[in-house]
Amino acid sequence: MSVQMRLVHTRMGMTPPALHSEESAREMALHAPQPSPMPARMRARFTATTDGCVIRVLPKRGLRSGGVLVFLHGGAYVYPLVEGQWGIVEGLIDRTGLPVIIPDYPLAPAHTATDAFDVVQPIIDEAQAEFGRVILFGDSAGGGLAISLAMQRRDAGARQVDGLVLYAPWVDVTMTNPAITDVQRLDKILRVPGLAWAGRAWAGDLDPADPRISPLYGDLSALPPMLIFQGDADILGPDTIEFARAAARADVDVRLRVEPGGFHVYVLSVPFIPEAVAALDRSARFVTGILRSR
């Protein structure tokens, strides 16, 4: 673990953990802001246009053809795109040259997962028609949504996405894995009660253990290649590791990196943490490999 990783995680421990109770989760959802616009630092090198619920981000130089990245942001399904997540977008465009599409998908509790599915699946269809290859990437809740969408496309016989890049994906919103208790003492960011409430709000009329909500409980066969980054100081870690193992048993091409001392979505701290930089470097190589393989 780098000194930078340790310092950032320690600093996070100086503020109350996010979603530490059902009440805090409700308050977070109630006072959620508008999605963060592209930061000023990016405007000289990128263009961002918004059409309805879709943001398109393109580099002004070095645009690569042949594919597109679709970013599904995290936020426990109750919080919109935040400024820190733009660092992932920026880093992957810089490394791949590919455009990025960011769906502003509906959030709980005003909406449920099925509303988001209805919004995002057509965006993927349109991206495939326009760009060809589509790779989904997402952090936390966005990672869980990416897996769910891929599973649903497989089951519906729709054209599958070409790959998944997942940063601490939320694969089980029930938060019932006994191993979480051991990791909780290391995690200075997240707590179970608020996350479990957010998961129920996202599920709506569905069972939180429904595979469309919690992909860990689903059939993982015939999913596209996936690359997963997970910190071991993150209460989502036990479920992510279990998911990766289950996917491997189902003969999915899955590559998992468990970062020692890594906190929840540590890649958001790019470029300050070397492990985050390394994760984006590996992500770009994975994406490039997919584009060259077909």
Image (tube, grey):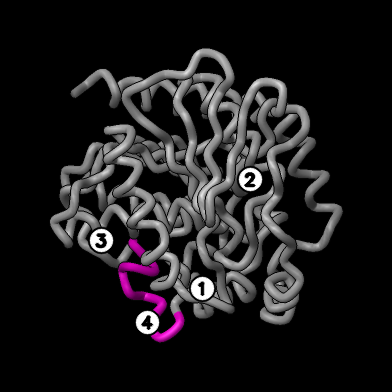
Q: Which amino acid does label 3 sit on?
A: Gln
Q: How far apart are marks 3 and 2 (CA)?
A: 30 Å
Callout 2 touching callout 4 (CB < 8 Å)? no
Q: How far apart are marks 3 and 4 (CA)?
A: 16 Å
Q: Mark 3 points at which residue?
A: 152
**Residue furthest top as drawn:** 62
Q: Residue 207 carries which label?
A: 4
Decide if residue 83 is on the left or right side of residue 284.
Answer: right
Q: 10 Å neighbourhood of mark 2: few (<14), some, or many (≥20)?
A: many
Q: Mark 1 points at which residue?
A: 199
Q: Which amino acid does label 1 sit on?
A: Gly
Residue 105, x across and y down, in percent = 51, 60
Please report whichever mark, 2 or 4, sits nearer to the chain's N-terminal start.
Answer: 4
> The residue tagged with tag 3: helix, strand or loop?
helix
Q: Distance between the residues labelled 3 and 1?
A: 19 Å
Magenta span: 204-215
Quadrant of the frame with the N terminus: top right
**Residue furthest front as drawn:** 51
Q: Which of marks 3 and 4 is in front?
A: 3
Please report whichever mark, 3 or 4, sits nearer to the chain's N-terminal start.
Answer: 3
